[in-house]
């Protein structure tokens, strides 16, 4: 077409068009410049996220060290030993992360749940934060001779917590499952008050109303005061509670990944806490056993929890974040398996005792650390080269999780917040930390429970137990000890079969002296006598 024919508009209209083109051109330049700036900001945020690992703390309620097919206990050379309970339980996902990471064979938690959970949140021993018992959501459960000034209220808004510290360095903090940080109508009952951006299913109570979607997880039943919140979309369905929590955790993680933020996922299963309602997905695996029905149901809860772990690992794979996601797996106290007497070698065999007891079966829990998928050549995993299939034999405990994760993420704890634990970073890479004191303090100034009014002090191979009121009967009417003192050498007698209190008076006195010093240093509260006088541990009246 001839050029003259292409211009069919008046000259002033042509001028307006050119002016509009110029304005559009300038707008386009500004938009491109803005896009470049936004791209730089987003890239910077992504780079920051890439420098920090995603973290999943996978916490299982009432799971002890023997409630798994993964063998944690070892012989004198450090080789794992399979015991009958390892053959009974089915935990292939735990086997998966144990094969790709490191497990600890002497890892301790407090003997009941709220104490451990608040210790993880604060990095403090229960003797210091004073939430020394499980928190009854409705009434103060100090016990008849328990300290009146214990911390029944639990955590409070504004306190330094692990999620609040991680949040300060850019983490999306996600709570899924059991809370149990404080009683009803208190700040600690709501995880959103405690540093979490998201709360799914967390409340004041520890036991679920029901595991069954058909029962709306307790809503509308006689256990409605323990109805698990925020899961209404599953009510009336056949979705088991462990599965519903997993589905919601996957959604929360996906949203965080899309936002470009690293996440801290505190995935705290209600399983395997009572009520022992069988997970129908796994019931057939245990139906031929000679174990009682409640023990079979407990095993299905274990397997359902383990499926959840595997589903999360697979989800990280699907999102392409496995190589930059650190998994910390643990239980919150010793086993509650219904397999025998609370002070016998039964529920956590060959260990003695179970949840709530002063023996090793009440406090030893599984602990595994692993990258969700091994990629040892990546910069992030080179900064924490967790060995494959390793076993760490040094003593560690739940109070060490806080300082470990703050160190790994570069988070700083401001103010005068005291941390009792120490970083496990050297232990996670399979090294021995010769500067680390292998000690553990467990203070339970309450009753009645499976053991009452006791303090445990471990230092090296030695473990001392002080019973403030040994004649006070524990649950089931049992007598927990013949006297105030028990003493065991765990190297020579790992299953606590021989009390050495009367035959090793020098060691007993030394250990009790250390116990007293530790309690004073932690500003502990104590059980009381009938007159309200504090019953602090006393040195034995023995000669060296």
Image (spheres, rainbow, N blue to C red):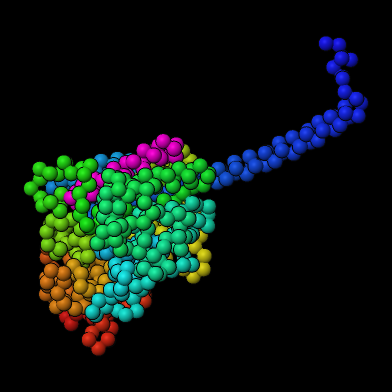
Task: Give the percent coordinates (x, y) of residue 447.
Answer: 22, 74
Q: Is residue 193 above or below residue 53?
A: below
The residue located at (31%, 70%) in the rendering is 138
Residue 530: tell me if it is visible: yes
Horizontal and vertical percent position of residue 452? 20, 73
Quarter that holds the N terminus? top right
Work out which residue is located at the far left of the displayed protein and give it: 290
Q: Is residue 312 magenta?
A: yes
Q: Position of residue 443 (x, y in %)?
A: 28, 71
Residue that appears at 22% across and 62% down: 355
Furthest residue in direction bottom, as rendered = 531
Instruction: Say whether residue 64 is magenta.
Output: no
Which quadrant would residue 130 be assigned to in this image?
bottom left
Q: Does residue 384 lie above or below 442 as drawn?
A: above
Q: Residue at x 87, y 14 (%)?
A: 5
- Which portion, as a residue range, is magenta? 297-322
User: How would you classify the magenta stretch by its main secondary structure?
Assistant: helix
> Where 439 falls versus 83 (above or below)?
below
Q: Quadrant of the C terminus?
A: bottom left
User: What x and y, as percent, mark residue 344?
Assistant: 12, 62
Q: Quadrant of residue 462?
A: bottom left
């Amino acid at each position: 077409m001839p050029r003259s024919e292409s211009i069919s508009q008046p000259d002033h209209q042509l001028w307006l068009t050119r002016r509009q083109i110029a304005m559009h051109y300038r707008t386009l330049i500004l938009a491109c410049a803005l896009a470049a700036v936004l791209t730089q900001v987003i890239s910077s945020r992504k780079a920051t996220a890439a420098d920090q690992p995603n973290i999943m703390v996978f916490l299982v309620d009432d799971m002890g060290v023997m409630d798994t097919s993964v063998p944690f206990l070892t012989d004198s050379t450090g080789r794992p030993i399979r015991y009958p309970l390892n053959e009974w339980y089915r935990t292939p996902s735990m086997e998966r992360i144990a094969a790709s990471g490191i497990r600890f064979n002497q890892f301790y938690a407090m003997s009941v749940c709220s104490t451990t959970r608040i210790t993880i949140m604060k990095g403090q021993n229960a003797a210091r934060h004073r939430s020394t018992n499980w928190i009854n959501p409705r009434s103060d459960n100090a016990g008849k001779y328990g300290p009146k000034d214990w911390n029944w209220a639990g955590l409070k808004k504004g306190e330094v917590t692990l999620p609040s510290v991680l949040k300060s360095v850019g983490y999306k903090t996600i709570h899924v499952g059991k809370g149990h940080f404080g009683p009803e109508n208190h700040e600690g009952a709501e995880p959103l008050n405690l540093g979490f951006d998201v709360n799914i299913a967390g409340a004041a109570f520890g036991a679920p109303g029901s595991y069954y979607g058909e029962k709306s997880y307790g809503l509308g039943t006689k256990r409605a005061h323990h109805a698990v919140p925020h899961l209404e979309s599953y009510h009336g369905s056949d979705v088991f509670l462990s599965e519903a929590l997993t589905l919601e955790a996957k959604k929360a993680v996906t949203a965080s990944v899309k936002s470009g933020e690293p996440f801290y996922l505190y995935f705290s299963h209600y399983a395997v806490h009572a009520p022992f309602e069988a997970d129908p997905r796994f019931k057939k695996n245990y139906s031929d056993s000679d174990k009682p029905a409640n023990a079979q149901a407990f095993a299905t809860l274990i397997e359902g929890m383990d499926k959840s772990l595997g589903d999360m690992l697979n989800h990280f794979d699907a999102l392409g974040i496995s190589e930059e996601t650190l998994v910390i797996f643990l239980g919150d106290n010793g086993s509650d398996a219904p397999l025998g007497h609370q002070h016998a070698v039964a529920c956590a065999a060959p260990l003695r005792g179970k949840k709530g007891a002063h023996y090793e079966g009440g406090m030893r829990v599984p602990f595994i650390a692993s990258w969700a998928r091994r990629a040892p050549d990546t910069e992030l995993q080179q900064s924490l080269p967790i060995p494959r299939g390793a076993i760490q034999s040094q003593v560690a405990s739940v109070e060490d999780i806080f300082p470990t994760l703050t160190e790994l993420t570069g988070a700083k704890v401001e103010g005068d917040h005291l941390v009792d634990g120490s970083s496990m970073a050297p232990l996670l890479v399979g090294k021995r930390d010769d500067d680390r004191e292998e000690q553990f303090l467990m203070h339970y100034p309450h009753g009645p429970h499976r053991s009452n009014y006791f303090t445990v002090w471990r230092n090296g191979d030695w473990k001392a137990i002080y019973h403030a009121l040994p004649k006070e009967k524990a649950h089931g009417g049992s007598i927990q000890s013949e006297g105030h003192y028990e003493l065991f050498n765990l190297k020579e007698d790992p299953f606590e079969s021989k009390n050495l209190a009367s035959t090793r008076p020098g060691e007993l006195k030394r250990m009790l002296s250390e116990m007293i010093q530790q309690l004073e240093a932690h500003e502990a509260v104590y059980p009381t006598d009938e007159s309200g006088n504090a019953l602090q541990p006393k040195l034995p009246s023995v000669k060296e």
